[in-house]
Image (tube, coloured by chain):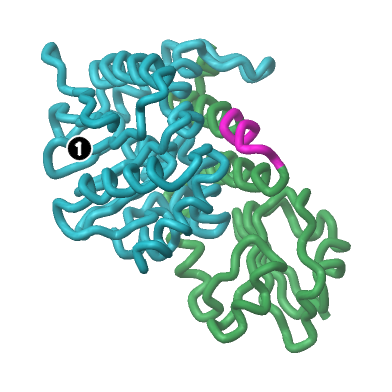
Chain colours: A cyan, B green
Amino acid sequence: MDEKTLVLTENNGILTLTMNAPSNNLMTADFFVQYEAVMTEVEERAKSEHIKGMVICGGGRHFSTGADVEALADRSSKESYDDSTGTLPAGHIKQKHYFTFLRLLPFPVVSAVTGFCIGSGSEIAVNSHYRIIEKNARVGQPESTFGILPALGGVARTIDICGMQNAYELVMSGELITAERAYDIGWADIFAEKKQSVPEAEKLIEYISANEDFAPGRAKEIMSRYKESRGI
Amino acid sequence: MMKIEIKNAVTEVRDASSVSEILSCGSELGEPCLLIVFPGKDFSADEPFPPETPYMTAIAADEDKAQEYRSAADLVIPAGDVDGYTEKLFKDKSLSQIREITACFTAARNGSQEYVLARESKAFYRLMAEKNGGSSNG
């Protein structure tokens, strides 16, 4: 993946990260290199007060099909983890930072979810403050079906957004769920028609910019007011 | 009289009168990842399972009773299809994998998100070592 397939743009104070990587944004080693570079740039731009929010979306039909599990197994076998000290590999800490820091950004981060949003792709979404899901999307954390579990925030954040029971079922079973089900259990904040998730995300960010004093800890209450204002 | 049936990752309890009675059985409950209570007519859900319970807890209830049990256990599951529910959750998973995943959830009852984030990472490396043939990754 020599060309830049993760593109960060800014328009009217809204950052948009568009993911156009091969195989429906399969998260290969190259994907992660680009992802970390882009998120370093986001971290820098977050210091500027004029950013209203960020939208993360897939450039094609799918948000992301998640990590390449075999590549992940190969990489982790070369990493050093000593369970007696609990010290995690530096590479993992860095990679995880660029997922979980999304929740700490001072502006709203909205994942516009289309098509498949699976595994580590879903972990980008659950680390975002908000998720807008399009009809026909499918989401899930299938890591458990490969003998592992989601470790880039997929357990902690899913519990936070969906509650204990829904999160346990999603993570333990590894089943993919429909957009309707994702909305019903609270995984998604807003249900959108086809091709409407990005415009809906921009609308949400503009609302927050105009009406709210955003802070990560207030994300849920702000969403409640937004939905009330829209009659959703 | 209370009946206990241990099935791999799951322990099923029938005819208990309260959570206290169940917990008083201690090691007779085995070492479940998920303990499922089938409440009889005398079961009181007034007292919830304590947050330090080292396994996930569930009450098998019909839909019209589900709300009544919602705050007593981690899960309320369909009484008519408990085997189907547990099959869907645990199919093709090793006991150690089920334990690692479950431990992240039981930790989340009281732990901060930062604690659970760290816990899921450590569990990932333990499971990946198992997947890679038992090497310790280190």
The image shows residue B40, relative to residue A150, as above or below, that is: below
Image quadrant in which the C terminus of chain B is located: top right
Along the line of sight, the residue nearer the viewer: A8 or B99 = A8
Asked where in the image residue A231 lies, by quadrant, the reply is: bottom left
Q: Residue at x 44, y 41 (%)?
A: A129
Residue sticking out furthest to the front: A210
Relative placement, left or right, of A185 versus A198 is right
Tell me, yes or no, if residue B53 can be seen here.
yes
Q: Is residue A145 visible?
A: no
- Answer above or below: position of A141 versus B135: below
Residue toward you, B130 or A197? A197
| Numbered marks: total | 1
x%, y% of residue A145?
Answer: 38, 44
Which chain does tag 1 point to?
Answer: A
Q: Position of residue A159 (x, y in %)?
A: 54, 49
Quadrant of the rendering where the N terminus of chain B is positioned: bottom right
Residue A28 in the image, given as x and y percentages of width and height: 25, 23
Q: Which residues are magenta?
A: B111-118
Q: Secondary structure at mark 1?
A: strand
Point out the residue furthest to the bottom here.
Answer: B41
Q: Nearest the camera: A219 or B96?
A: A219
Determine which residue is flagged by label 1.
Answer: A58
